[in-house]
Image: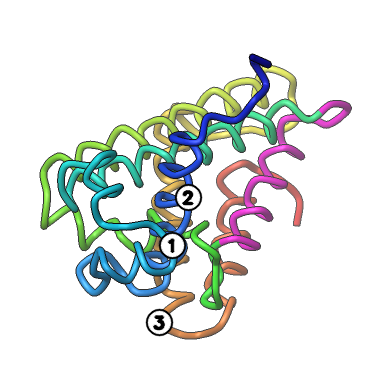
Amino acid sequence: MNSATTNPATDVRANILATGQRIMAGKGYSAVGLNEILTAAGVPKGSFYHYFGSKDAFGEALLQHYFDDYLAEIDRTMAEPDLTMAQRLMNYWQLWQDSQSFEDCQGKCLAVKLGAEVADLSESMRLVLRRGTDGIISRLSAAIEMGVSEGSLKIDGDAADAARTLYQLWLGASIMVKIERTTAPFATALASTRQILHLAP
C-alpha cells in the first residue's frame, strides 16, 4: 500500500471538522446543531459518534484542529525568507486583517467567534482556547525578541508583555470590526502596533 494513500477514516473526520468550523465560524457554537453539520458534511450521525463522543468533544477537537493550522501558518509567516522580522510581523497582521473580517471568514475567525461563548460553556474547550492563544503569544514574543536582536524593531519593556498586548489589541479590534461592520478598528490597531514596535508609519 502506498504510504501517500489517504486514509478514508481520516478523510471523514477531517470533513466533519472542516464543515463544522465553517458553519460555527458563521453562527457560533450553541446555535449550530449536530444535524446541520452532518447534513452539510454528508455524514450519518453514527459516523459522528465514531469519531467524537459528544458535541463538546467535537468542540475540543475543532478548536485544536483550528489552532494546529493557525500556529503552523504563523510559523510559515515568521520563516519567510529575505525579510526582516519586523516585515514578517507586519505581514502577520495583514493576514489577520484578511482572515478576520466581518464578512464570511470561511472558518478562519473561529477563535474570535467562539472564544467568549465556549469559554463560559465548557472548561475543556476553554483550556484548548487557552493553550492555543498561549501558543500564538509565545510565537509573537519570540518574533519580537528576534526583531529586537536584529534591529528591525524596538520595544519598551519585555517581549512577552508586548506580544500579549498586541494579541489582545488585535483580538479586541476583531470584535469591534464585527460590531461596527467596518475595518476601521484594524487601522487603529495597526497604528498602535507600529507605535509599540517603534516602526515608522
Identify residue for label 3. 179
- Magenta range is 81-99
Task: Check the picture and name the quadrant holding the N terminus.
Answer: top right
163 to 102, vertically: above or below: above
Q: Select label 2 or label 3 by which is in front.
A: 2
Give the left or right position of residue 178, taking residue 120 as reference. right
In percent of width and height, residue 93 lies at 63, 51
Q: Residue type at mark 3: give it.
A: Ile
Q: Select label 1 or label 2 by which is in front.
A: 1
In percent of width and height, residue 179 lies at 40, 82
Q: State how far apart marks 1 and 2 are (Cα).
A: 9 Å
Q: At numbered mark 1, what does the secondary structure look like: helix, strand or loop?
A: loop
> Marks 1 and 2: CB-CB under 8 Å?
yes
Count of labels shown?
A: 3
Q: Residue type at mark 1: give it.
A: Gly
Identify residue for label 2. 15
Seen from the viewer's position, the closer of residues 107 and 44 is 44
Q: At numbered mark 3, what does the secondary structure look like: helix, strand or loop?
A: helix
Q: Residue type at mark 2: give it.
A: Asn
Magenta highlight on residue 92: yes
Task: Tell me which numbered mark, 2 or 3, is placed earlier along the sequence.
Answer: 2
Residue under the point 28% across and 49% down: 48
Q: Main secondary structure of the magenta part?
A: helix
Q: Select label 1 or label 3 by which is in front.
A: 1
Task: Tell me which numbered mark, 1 or 3, is placed earlier along the sequence.
Answer: 1
Identify residue for label 1. 42
Give the left or right position of residue 88, taking residue 186 as reference. right
Task: Tell me which numbered mark, 1 or 2, is placed earlier along the sequence.
Answer: 2
Residue under the point 39% across and 62% down: 172
Residue under the point 52% across and 57% down: 108
In percent of width and height, residue 105 lies at 55, 67
Residue under the point 42% across and 57% down: 21
